[in-house]
Image (tube, rainbow, N blue to C red):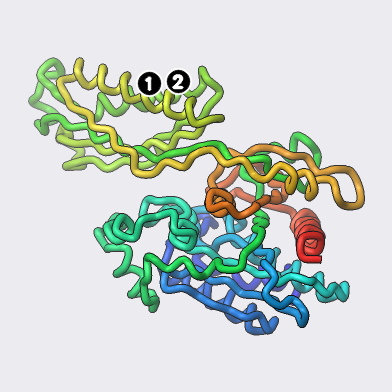
Amino acid sequence: MSFEQMWADLASVGRSRSSGGYFRPAFGSAERECHAWFLDQCATRGLETRTDGNGNTVAWWRPEGTGDQPGVLTGSHLDSVPDGGAYDGPLGVMSALAAIDRLRERGVAPSRPIGVAAFAEEEGSRFGLACLGSRLATGQLDPATARELRDRDGVPLPDAMAAAGLAPDLGDTSLLDGVGWFVELHVEQGRGLVDLAAPIGVASGIWPHGRYRFDFTGEANHAGTTVMDDRHDPMLSCAMTVLAANKQARLGGQRATFGRFEVTPNSTNAVPSRVTAWLDARCEDDATLAALVAEVSRLGRERAARDGTGLEVTAESVSPAVAFDPDLAARLAGDHAGPDWPVLATQAGHDAGILAGAGIPTAMLFVRNPTGISHAPAEHAEVADCLAGVDALADSLERLAG
């Protein structure tokens, strides 16, 4: 099946008719439909497939003679953020399947197995922890901690897995046994390749990033009868903290975003008693990230003190900086026909970063995104660039498994 046919298969799954965006939450019906499609594609290709109890799947192509050699794994994820784009995740899974097709068309006989992975809950949009599936698969998330995770409706992670037909085993790390290398292809989530006029790029590393919960507390009161000087309004404290985060990130050339809020009682005619806001912060190194969050927290507390409100800051997840194997990156960037592909850092988190943190030599390929937009319906990649990505991935797999 061609790349274009595979893309058409999933084009409508989880897509909003109004916005054109996608909502494929982890362990939900749309994500599970995509996963069933993936299993069918693997079966059609005669791949040896295994799914762990946590929703992660690895499918291996083991040509005769590959034996017990460490394998080369590729792939990505199938879940999305709310109203997300079509390419973030699925592009890497489809390109991996298409790359195996391309290698077979070329008559390549790899000396090592080649696998395709589909990891669960990469976005962290349901349970608040990015790369949840790959963290479990590599043993980088304590099972007891995972067991306590809840979605916004209060559903525990094991219950959500069970409702999706899985048999949760939060301590199972056997799925990645035998993986010697990992190469993830992903749509670029920015304009780096557009500015460099290159269809394909190679990642040097991932900026450290974290998600932090800011709990502002105040005093509920009447919106009309309470004079402004008598208010203890946590919304005001929150708003000023959002502005402070924006300013601090701009001054340092970093990233800070408040994108999710919960308000109590959430009434038009009442001063709120509580505002919870989530900060997504990303910086060029770990020390800068810690300093940025500390400064935003300090400014938020200072403002809360002036407003007569309270502020508690909780780090919900923090991922350190990732430096991909430089020799592997250089090899993929230059060991092919034509000019070298550019090597650039990414500010977005990926399963590749988790596998690299587990000690697996890892690389990433990026496909140009002409809009530069991601996590939104306008995310895009031209078919010609997608096909160039398939060729680039096939070439990389052939070199590593040859």
Position of residue 104 in the picture relative to residue 224 (left or right) = right
**Do the numbered discs 2 and 1 sit on residues whose CB atoms are within 8 Å?**
yes
Q: Measuring from the top left, give residue 292's x and y in whole percent.
A: 43, 24
Q: Quadrant of residue 121?
A: bottom left
Is 247 above or below relative to 79? above
Mark 1: give few (<14), some (14-19) or many (20+) Cα within 10 Å: some
Of pointers 2 and 1, the one earlier in the residue sequence: 2
Residue 28 x/y as whole percent: 41, 68
Report the residue marked by disc 1.
295
Q: Nearest the camera: 199 or 45?
A: 45
In the figure, is residue 269 to the left or right of 147?
Answer: left
Kindly identify the amino acid type of the residue bearing the numbered disc 1: Glu
Residue 211, located in which quarter of the rendered image?
top left
Nearest to the eye among marks 2 and 1: give it: 1
Q: Residue at x 78, y 58 (%)?
A: 396
Q: Is residue 262 left or right of residue 164?
A: left
Q: Is residue 254 left or right of residue 164?
A: right
Tell me the element at label 2: helix
Percent x, y for residue 362? Answer: 65, 52
* Quadrant location, the N terminus: bottom right
10 Å neighbourhood of mark 2: few (<14), some, or many (≥20)?
A: some
Residue occupying the point 49% across, 66% down? 14
Instruction: Find the residue positioned furthest to the front.
Output: 68
- Mark 2 to mark 1 CA distance (whole Å): 8 Å
Q: Amino acid at mark 2?
A: Gln
Please state which of residues 150 and 70 is positioned toward the viewer in this rendering.
Answer: 70
Q: Residue at x 84, y 46 (%)?
A: 334
Quadrant of the rendering where the C terminus is positioned: bottom right
Q: Nearer the viewer, residue 102 or 174?
A: 174
Q: Which mark is residue 248?
A: 2
